[in-house]
Image (tube, helix red, strand yellow):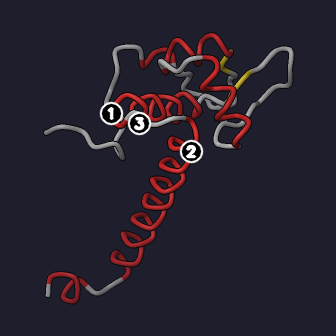
């Protein structure tokens, strides 16, 4: 089964992602792990999709940003999106994931017969 854009397929460099989100990821590490170009990342930061953990001149990021940046890179590669298009797509994908999570939570609260019905 091919992963969708909502799923993050396992990558060979998963070890590049710190297990602890409190551990910072350096700019160069993020670029290497995600495949984004520096200019693209700077634009995604300016748009507000990617948040800096540190301040300039030393930019650092939360570990979870690696997953977000990889998704941005896949959107660019799969659909030819520019950073503004990537930002829009990421916003909608995040909203869809939130709604799906809420739906699963609500479904788990229903009596079993109502779900199977």
Labels 3 & 1 near each other (Cβ < 8 A): yes
Residue 108 is drawn in which quadrant? Answer: bottom left
- The residue depicted at 60 percent of the width and 28 percent of the height is 63
Q: Residue 78 carries which label?
A: 1
Query: What secondary structure is found at the residue carrying circle 2?
Result: helix
The vertical placement of 74 against 107, above or below, is above
Q: Nearer the viewer, residue 86 or 96?
A: 86
Q: Say left or right for 59 vs 103.
A: right
- The residue depicted at 49 percent of the width and 16 percent of the height is 33
Q: Say left or right for 25 vs 16.
A: right
Query: CA gap, disc 3 to disc 1?
Result: 5 Å
Q: Which of 97 and 78 is in front in this view?
A: 78
- Residue count near mark 1 (Cα–Cα under 10 Å), binned few <14, some 14–19, many ≥20: few
Q: Which mark is residue 87?
A: 2
Task: Give the image location of residue 18, x and y in percent.
Answer: 56, 22
- Residue count near mark 2 (Cα–Cα under 10 Å), binned few <14, some 14–19, many ≥20: many
- The residue depicted at 50 percent of the width and 54 percent of the height is 94
Query: What secondary structure is found at the residue carrying circle 3?
Result: helix
In the picture, the quarter occupied by the C terminus is bottom left
Query: What secondary structure is found at the residue carrying circle 1?
Result: helix
Looking at the image, tell me whether mark 2 or mark 1 is earlier in sequence order. Answer: 1
Query: CA gap, disc 3 to disc 2?
Result: 10 Å
Q: Residue 75 carries which label?
A: 3
The vertical placement of 36 against 79, above or below, is above
In the picture, the quarter occupied by the N terminus is top left
Q: Which of 37 and 62 is in front in this view?
A: 37
Looking at the image, tell me whether mark 3 or mark 2 is earlier in sequence order. Answer: 3
Query: CA gap, disc 2 to disc 1?
Result: 15 Å
Task: Give the image location of residue 104, x and y in percent.
Answer: 36, 69
């Amino acid at each position: 089964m091919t992963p969708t854009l909502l799923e993050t397929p396992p990558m060979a460099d998963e070890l590049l992602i710190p297990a602890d989100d409190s551990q910072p990821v350096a700019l160069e590490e993020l670029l290497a792990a995600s495949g984004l170009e520096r200019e693209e990342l700077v634009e995604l930061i300016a748009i507000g999709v990617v948040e800096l953990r540190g301040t300039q001149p030393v930019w650092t990021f939360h570990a979870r940003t690696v997953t977000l940046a990889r998704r941005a890179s896949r959107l660019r590669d799969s659909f030819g999106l520019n950073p503004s298009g990537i930002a829009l797509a990421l916003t909608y994908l995040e909203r869809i994931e939130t709604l799906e999570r809420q739906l699963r939570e609500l479904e788990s609260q229903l009596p079993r017969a109502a779900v199977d019905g």
